[in-house]
Amino acid sequence: MDDDWFQDDSQIDSRQLELKLAENEQKRNQRDQWNKGYLDGLEWADKNYSSYDLNESDSSIQDLREHFDKSVEEGRFAYLLLADNLGPSFDEQRNELRQMMEQLNLGLKNQDQSDHIVNQSRELRQKINKDIDIEMN
C-alpha cells in the first residue's frame, strides 16, 4: 500500500518538474520574441529613417519621430503577445506588420513631409493595438 502512495507522489513530482521546465522554456521564448521585435523595429528605423535629420525637420516629422519611438516600444509587446497567442500563425502576422511598415516608409519617401505621414504612423500603431486586443479577447 505504501508503495502505491510513493509511486503516485513520484509521478506528481515528475509532472510538476515537467510543467516548471515548460514554463521556463515559454518565458525564454517570450523574452526572445520581445527582444527580436525590438531589434527588428530598430533595424527598420535605422534603414528607413537614416536619411532624415529629424532634429532639423518640421513639426510633422518631429511628431513622426515621437510616434515611431512609441511604435518601437509597442512593437515589443506586439511581438510578445502575438508569439504567445498565435503560435505558428505568428509569422503571417509579422509579415503583415512588416508590409505595413514598408508602406509607411514609401509614404515617407513619396509624400510631402505633412500630416499625412504622421497619420500613417498612427494608423500603423492602431492596427498593432487592434490586433493585440482581438487576440487577447
Image: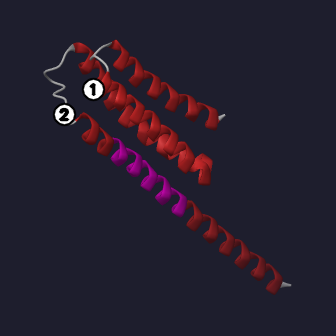
Residue 90 to residue 134: above or below? below
Residue 41 point in image, percent of width and height: 35, 41
Q: Which residue shows up at 59% across the image and 31% down it?
A: 133
Answer yes or no: is residue 70 visible. no
Q: Which residue is mark 1?
A: 65
Please tell me whether residue 35 is drawn above or below residue 54 in the rendered image.
below
Span shown in magenta:
24-41
Q: Nearer the viewer, residue 114 or 38?
A: 114
Please tell me in which quadrant of the rendered image residue 2 appears: bottom right
User: In the image, 11: left or right of 22?
Assistant: right
Q: Is residue 112 magenta?
A: no
From the top left corner, tell me how far across and down residue 12 is, in percent.
71, 72
What's the residue type where badge 2 is placed? Ser
If the image is split into quadrants, where does the N terminus sit? Answer: bottom right
What residue is disc 2 on? 51
Q: Secondary structure at mark 1?
A: helix
Amino acid type, mark 1: Arg
Q: Residue at x 52, y 62 (%)?
A: 24
**Number of residues whose C-alpha sits closer than 10 Å to that of mark 1, classed few (under 14), some (14–19) or many (20 or more):** some
Viewer-closest of 109 and 47: 109
Q: Residue at x 43, y 56 (%)?
A: 32
- Residue 101 shows in this picture: yes
Q: Position of residue 110 (x, y in %)?
A: 31, 24
Q: SS of the residue at dot 2?
A: loop
* Colour convention of the picture: secondary structure
The numbered dot on residue 14 is none
Furthest residue in direction left, as rendered: 56
Q: Main secondary structure of the magenta part?
A: helix
Who comes first in sequence, dot 2 or dot 1? 2
What percent of the width, then of the height, locates residue 69? Answer: 31, 31
Query: In the rendered view, does 135 fall on the left or right side of 50?
Result: right
